[in-house]
Image (tube, helix red, strand yellow):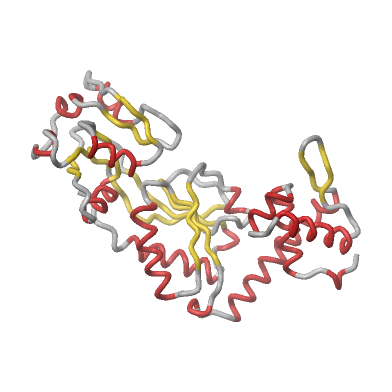
Amino acid sequence: MAAEQLDLNLLRVFDALMDTSSVSGAADRLHLSIPAASRALGRLRHAMNDPILVRAGRGMVPTPFAQRAATRVKALLDDADRLRLESVGDPSTWRRTFAIRINDALSPVLAPRLTRLVAKEAPHVQLRFVAQASKEADLLRNGTLDLDVGVADPAPPDVLTSVLFTDIFVAVVSASSELGAKRSLTIEDLCSVPHVSASRRGLDRGPLDDALERIGHSRRVIAVVPTYAVGALMALEDDVLCLIPSRLASHLQERGVPIRAHQVPVGLPIATVEQRWHQRADVDPASRWLRSAMTAATATLPAPK
């Protein structure tokens, strides 16, 4: 092996190739052009005297040597990152990007607060908020994500968590509508107007339907939208109702969106929101700083109503 030809940048390409089994995937992760990633693979093949990735059907798979080396390379890169951060411990001097997966109910509320806080303490740090297409932990394990923020679920053993806050769901209608003029909603009110269901998975049924069925009622869902913010905005346009998290409703009202948020007249589960990170980042100074910043940002959230 021509070790003198290897550097950390090449090893980062190797790590990305192992995680994605794809030149284009590695290029996307590292913000490189595909030709640049392909050239880096060529240099790795020469330096390691191994093909690294080989064709298998329509895709590519790592060679046995590459599979054996992958864990060692990832550990080496983690050590290098820790050394770099320990030698430059002041966040105001950092030049890096943190990737945070966050769901659509939280991003309008948390992203602005966290961004403002980080900009004050670490002006050269960039936050990249990633949509929560899934809650799989693999992106935390391989370092693609630094944090995962969402509704609490049982975590795998290698993923650590801390609770940020709890929230409830409220029924949102247009402030100028008939229900918007009411002081509170009854069960009959809740079932008298069409509903918009907000679900990233496209579901038209949820805990509200179960609660209504238990008391002999039902609702009519006329549309399913991918985000809570879209559901709230639809309530402005038509005589419809949408359930959204209370803190998001308060956030929209504080910014002048003319919605009315009513308490739901049936019992619904309380949502616990947590942040997650991989155990290998637990004592990392940058990860600890980011988690602390996230906790501080949530302290300024409007209280659930």
Q: Front-most of 182 and 169?
A: 182
Quadrant of image for the N terminus: bottom right
Residue shown at 68%/55% (left/top)? 27
Answer left or right for 17 relative to 273: right
Residue shown at 31%/50% (left/top)? 166
Q: Front-most of 119 and 63?
A: 119
| Vertical placement of residue 84 versus 198, above or below | below
Q: Where is residue 63 in the image (x, y as percent from the top left)?
A: 84, 48
Q: Where is residue 122 in the image (x, y as percent from the top left)?
A: 46, 74
Where residue 187 sits, quadrant-wise, is top left
Answer left or right for 237 relative to 43: left
All told, the count of numbered labels is: 0
Residue shown at 50%/59% (left/top)? 128
Answer left or right for 191 relative to 183: right
Where residue 109 sits, quadrant-wise, is bottom left
Q: Where is residue 3 in the image (x, y as percent from the top left)?
A: 86, 69
Q: Position of residue 137 (x, y in %)?
A: 56, 48
| Vertical placement of residue 149 versus 184, above or below | below
Residue shown at 74%/57% (left/top)? 37
